[in-house]
Amino acid sequence: MILVLSPDTGPESPDYKQLLAYLANMPGISTRVRTEVGSEQTLTEVYLIGNTKALLVEDMQNLPCVEQVVRISEEYRVLGRHKDDHRPTYFDYNGVRFGQDTLNVFAGLCAVDTLEHVELMMQALRDHGQVCTRMGAYKPRTSPYSFQGHGKACLPYVFELAGKYGIRVIAMEITHESHLEEICDALYRTGNATGVMLQIGTRNTQNFELLKIVGRQQDFPVLLKRGFGITLDESLNAAEYLASEGNRKVVFGLRGMKTNMGDPHRNFVDFAHVPVVKRLTRMPVCIDPSHSVGMRAASPDGILDIMHATAQGVIAGANMILVDFHPAPGKALVDGPQALLMRELPLFLEDVAIARKAYEQRVALAQRYQEDAEPALSSSVQSA
């Protein structure tokens, strides 16, 4: 059970102290408090852990400073959707909103290679009104002899250029807790020129110790990619690891499933799960068409497979797109064959806008149909 307290209820409040004292005397119940500090107000949730089935929602609702009571199920306790759960399905970070009703494009370099390429990418994004990007500094690779990324050496110029070109959020994968420390240090040294969304890649989806470490910090939101060889439920529980440690600013990423059933694409595109994740949880959903498709092939209609896959995810309600671009794909040190060309950026963004408009029209149609159906249903019930 979750007790959502009135906004801006602080630990020094007499009502807050009275509530915690009351809960402390409840047999078999322990509490865990989570506080979310926003730009306009502070929200506090108190999680009751133990046998809460006997507790009446009405009784808990009448406790001091309690605004809402949510009875949670066993699955996805923090991030899941529960009955009468009206907690927000969005979060704000560094001036950008991430929610189940928004869409943000993170176009950029799968792996940072040169300062010049980083600047060309960010300049192009700025020129096309974009404030988010992807930049890989740490690259886990299948072969130990493959390029592993420049690591902390590239962070200063990546962050400085982001500040120069107005990039607000950079999605950046980490594979070790030391990477988190290096990012924090580089941001500090560059005057916090930008923001970072930590990315947990598919190989680390079930690296539970890393999930706990990343979950305990609340400075950065997290993009968790689905594990390529595990079930959706197992991947959603990995996201719950992050939230159970305190960080609820989590975006869930679909990046394709590792199976030859997806051939000739790199992975089997799993974007049909966009609405499933949004139904089961309160997380925004990201799609990664580049790693799903993995190549620049085009169909007879002239549209690249990567753009077709992107449209499929967007028209299903995706909230974030992670996509590879590169100024010179032939010189890219990682995944050059799947990178889109810089001249294709405006085409890609316009195509995304078309798919997003189609999604919004579908939502409006569904709502209109539901509104029309409700009076008819009510009338038939009364007649019966």
Image (cartoon, helix red, strand yellow):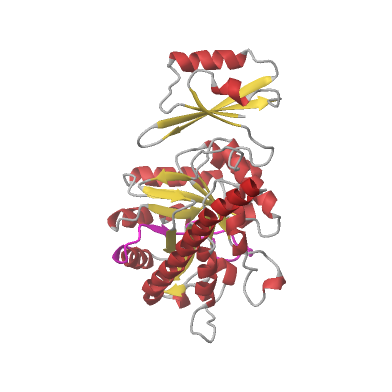
Q: Residue at x 45, y 61 (%)?
A: 360
Residue 200, percent across and down? Answer: 56, 51
Furthest toward the front, the residue is: 383
Residue drawn at point x = 47 percent, y = 15 percent: 15
Q: Is residue 353 visible?
A: yes
Given residues 357 and 221, the one toward you in this image is 357
Instruction: Count the marks.
Output: 0
- Where is residue 375 drawn, in percent x and y? 54, 51
Q: Is 61 placed above or below 351 here? A: above
User: Horizontally, is 302 left or right of 345 in the view?
Assistant: right
Vertical comparison of 297 with 252: above or below: below
162 drawn magenta:
no
Residue 144 lies in magenta, yes or no? Answer: yes
61 relative to 165, above or below: above
Is residue 334 something that shows in the picture? no
User: In front here: 219 or 103?
Assistant: 103
Provide residue 164's location: percent of width, then percent of height.
28, 56
| Left or right of 96, for residue 309 | right
Please report the residue visible at 45 percent of the width from the left and 74 percent of the height from the top: 340
Magenta stretch: helix, strand or loop mostly: loop
> Residue at (66%, 23%) from the top-left corner?
55
Which segment did they paint magenta?
A: 126-149
